[in-house]
Amino acid sequence: MSIIRIRAVREPLAAPLIARKAVATIARADAMGLLPADEVVETLEIETLRRLAGHLRKAGVAPAALAELAAWQGRDVARLAAILDELDEALAHSPVPEHEWGEVVRVLGEERLAEFLHISPSSLRRYGAGARTTPDEVAARLHHLALVIGNLAGTYNEIGVRRWFGRKRSQLKSRTPAELLHAAWAPEDAGPQRVLALSATLLASPAT
């Protein structure tokens, strides 16, 4: 995992809305394993985003939004916000299991992740090592979990992220997020969507 510890914010990212969008996008890319482990983000500025764009370009993710970011000249801040939205949306719909396995395993651990994905630990290791191609349905679940982790990363440390899945939530009718990731679930199912939506509320609010 990269080190994301924002100490300074520079124009044109200083507006709170733009800053939140930028940080959320960086956290999402990191949770998807798209940033180098030695990446350090301490200053939030346009060059930070362009450095991020370079990593995403190598992974073949969101080429249209990345091209717009590269062409943006620093005048239209509203357009920058729209580009960040486009980039975030592209990430949300772009499973990249070859990158996501390592990061999600590192955060959740093999045993817990295998339970969430409803596969055996041995299959998880084979998929993660690239010895076998990750089936589409498994890749979709893995990506969904990466999105949830990205949403939580700005509020919780890794221990907190793991515990979050096992804590009962009033928004889930006193069930835990883990309980809604059961059987052969798909990301579009109601339960997993509620888990993702709940994690997203933490992007703009204190830990709950």
Image (cartoon, rainbow, N blue to C red):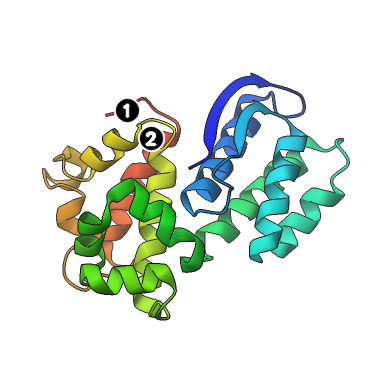
* Residue in the image at 45% along x and 59% along y: 100
Rounded to the nearest angstrom, the CA distance separating label 2 from label 1 is: 6 Å
Near-viewer residue (83 or 42): 42
Q: Which mark is residue 202?
A: 2
Amino acid at dot 2: Leu
Instruction: Pinpoint residue 141: horizontal percent, then vertical percent.
Output: 34, 66
Of label 2 and label 1, which has the lower sequence position? 2
Tell me the quarter of the picture where residue 65 sits: bottom right
* Residue in the image at 23% along x and 61% along y: 116
Q: Secondary structure at mark 1?
A: loop
**Along the horizontal axis of the image, is 28 left or right of 199?**
right
Instruction: Pinpoint residue 186: horizontal percent, then vertical percent.
Output: 30, 70
* Residue in the image at 61% along x and 32% along y: 41
Task: Give the residue furthest to the left.
Answer: 174
Within 10 Å of disc 1 (Cα), the crowding (few <14, some 14-19, many 20+) is some
Where's the C terminus, which quadrant?
Answer: top left
Q: Is residue 131 visible?
A: yes
Task: Give the residue furthest to the top.
Answer: 7
Amino acid at dot 1: Ala
Q: Is residue 181 visible?
A: no
202 is higher (above) or lower (below) than 50: above
Within 10 Å of disc 2 (Cα), the crowding (few <14, some 14-19, many 20+) is some
Q: Secondary structure at mark 2?
A: helix
Near-viewer residue (74 or 178): 178
**Along the horizontal axis of the image, is 79 left or right of 189?**
right
**Along the horizontal axis of the image, is 67 left or right of 28?**
right
Instruction: Pinpoint residue 22: horizontal percent, then vertical percent.
Output: 62, 38
Tell me the quarter of the picture where residue 135 sits: bottom left
Q: Which residue is mark 1?
A: 207
**Along the horizontal axis of the image, is 105 left or right of 87?**
left
Q: Are marks 2 and 1 in contact (CB under 8 Å)?
A: yes
